[in-house]
Image (spheres, helix red, strand yellow):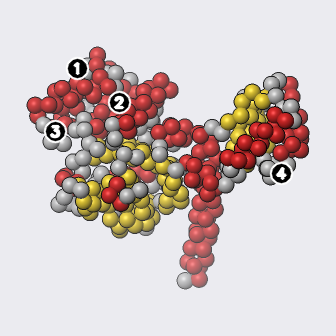
């Protein structure tokens, strides 16, 4: 990656609320055209970070740089409108006046963001149809479902055609069909070359759209890389295995699997799941080993129906690994702080 590709740079970003530090010394680069997924448990500091980029909250320490006219510039009270001109935000659940229509809301945001006046009408109609809301463009919001309101929220973030999009939990409260529509919409934005910074709790959604993933816990970034690199660093990956007649064989196959794969996996790395009649095999993520494991299964007459390393499952196990390590560390820090307080 070229440093000219960085469009947002966070340097040592920190936010204190009184004595509590919600965001601790975060440094992060977001590159042009990438989708960076932002993952973390409730209260980890995702919205606080995004609100600081939107200038809705001021950092206690650190700098936010945004590329404007080819240069990275530090965001401040004087230049915020100019620097944020090319950024679109969906922060937490947007609340709109219920008697207004999508056309009115989106026209308002387009004007506010300085979109060329004579093009606003066609722009609003274009994006409303991209989201499949054509028929609803002049209907009042009180008739809308939660999913439709969320779609209007997403459109309000993109109406001025920004290059960078910051979406905080865009999938909140959406049913699976609308979620797929929103995912496809985000993929479309990526195809257009937009940069997307996206927070979500839905690991599957993140694994489908994100090029890189930043994991935040207790206000700290504890990992930031591509899914493949995170997998290599963590040296853990999970194979999903389905075999013929698994319902009847069930966990009785596990002993045989250990015998066959003993040189490739550690103890306690095979599990059987009754509800889906499938097995999982933990291994270190090395593709050569993955190939060997499959070969051995076939050679030993295991009737394999499916053998895969699902991205979402992988992200889930990596996420839980990272978060549990960070929980341990936070607990240690808390204990040390209590000891220090006691000494003082
Ligand atoms: N205005 C505020 N005053 C005091 N504390 C706050 C404020 N805003 C956020 N916090 C605290 O900062 C921490 C981080 O909150 P934040 O909303 O950034 O988390 P999040 O990662 O977005 O969580 P979620 O996944 O639940 O949306 C939380 O402990 C929250 O209670
Ligand atoms: Mg949040």
Q: Which residue is mark 2?
A: 151
Question: Helix, strand, or loop for circle 3?
Answer: loop
The residue pinned by badge 1 equals 138
Is 301 on the left or on the right of 149, as rendered?
A: right
The residue wearing badge 3 is 115
Mark 1 residue crowding within 10 angstroms, few (<14) / some (14–19) / many (20+): few
Is residue 280 shown above or below 104? below
Secondary-structure class at tag 1: loop
Q: Quadrant of the N terminus?
A: bottom left
Q: Position of residue 319 (x, y in %)?
A: 59, 49
Marks 3 & 1, CB-CB < 8 Å contact: no
Which badge, 4 or 2, is on the more N-terminal residue? 2
Disc 2 to disc 3, C-alpha distance: 20 Å
The first of marks 3 and 4 along the sequence is 3
Q: Residues within 10 Å of mark 3 (few under 14, many from 20)?
A: some
Q: CA distance from mark 1 to mark 2?
A: 15 Å
Could you give the CA–CA distance between mark 4 and mark 1, rounded to whole angstroms?
65 Å
> Residue 46 in the image: x percent, y percent?
44, 51
Give the number of the mark in front: 3 or 4.
4
Kindly tell me whether residue 250 is visible in this rendering: no
Q: Residues within 10 Å of mark 2 (few under 14, many from 20)?
A: many
Nearer the camera: disc 4 or disc 1: 4
User: Is 129 placed left or right of 69 in the picture?
Assistant: right
- Residue tagged 4: 263
Residue mark closest to the camera, 3 vs 1: 3
Query: Is 49 in front, or is 74?
Result: 74
Nearest to viewer (mark 4 / mark 2): 4
Q: Closer to the N terminus: mark 3 or mark 1?
A: 3
Question: Which mark is nearer the camera, 2 or 3?
Answer: 3
Q: Residue extending furthest left?
A: 118
Residue at image x 25%, y 25%? 126
């Amino acid at each position: 990656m070229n440093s000219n590709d960085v469009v947002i740079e966070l340097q040592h970003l920190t936010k204190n609320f009184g004595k509590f530090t919600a965001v601790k010394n975060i440094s992060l680069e977001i590159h042009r055209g990438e989708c960076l997924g932002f993952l973390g448990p409730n209260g980890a500091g995702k919205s606080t970070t995004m609100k600081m980029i939107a200038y809705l909250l001021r950092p206690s320490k650190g700098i936010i740089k945004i590329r404007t006219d080819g240069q990275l510039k530090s965001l401040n009270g004087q230049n915020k409108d100019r620097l944020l001109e090319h950024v679109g935000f969906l922060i937490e659940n947007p609340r709109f006046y219920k008697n207004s229509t999508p056309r009115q809301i989106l026209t308002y945001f387009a004007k506010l963001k300085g979109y060329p006046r004579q093009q606003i009408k066609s722009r609003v109609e274009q994006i409303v149809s991209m989201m499949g809301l054509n028929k609803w463009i002049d209907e009042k919001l009180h008739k809308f479902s939660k999913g439709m309101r969320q779609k209007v929220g997403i459109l309000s973030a993109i109406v001025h055609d920004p290059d960078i999009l910051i979406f905080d939990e865009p999938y909140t409260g959406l049913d699976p069909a609308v979620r797929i529509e929103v995912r496809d919409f985000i993929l479309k934005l990526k195809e257009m070359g937009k940069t997307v910074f996206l927070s979500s709790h839905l690991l599957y959604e993140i694994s489908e759209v994100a090029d890189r993933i930043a994991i935040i816990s207790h206000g700290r970034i504890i990992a930031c890389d591509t899914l493949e690199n995170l997998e290599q660093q963590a040296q853990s990956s999970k194979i999903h295995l389905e075999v013929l007649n698994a319902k009847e064989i069930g966990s009785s196959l596990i002993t045989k699997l250990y015998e066959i794969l003993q040189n490739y996996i550690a103890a306690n790395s095979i599990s059987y799941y009754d509800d889906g009649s499938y097995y999982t095999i933990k291994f270190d993520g090395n593709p050569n080993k993955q190939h060997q494991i499959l070969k051995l299964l076939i050679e030993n007459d295991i009737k394999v129906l499916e053998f895969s390393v699902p991205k979402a499952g992988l992200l889930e196990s990596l996420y839980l690994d990272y978060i549990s390590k960070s929980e341990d560390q936070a607990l240690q820090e808390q204990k040390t702080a209590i000891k220090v307080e006691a000494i003082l």
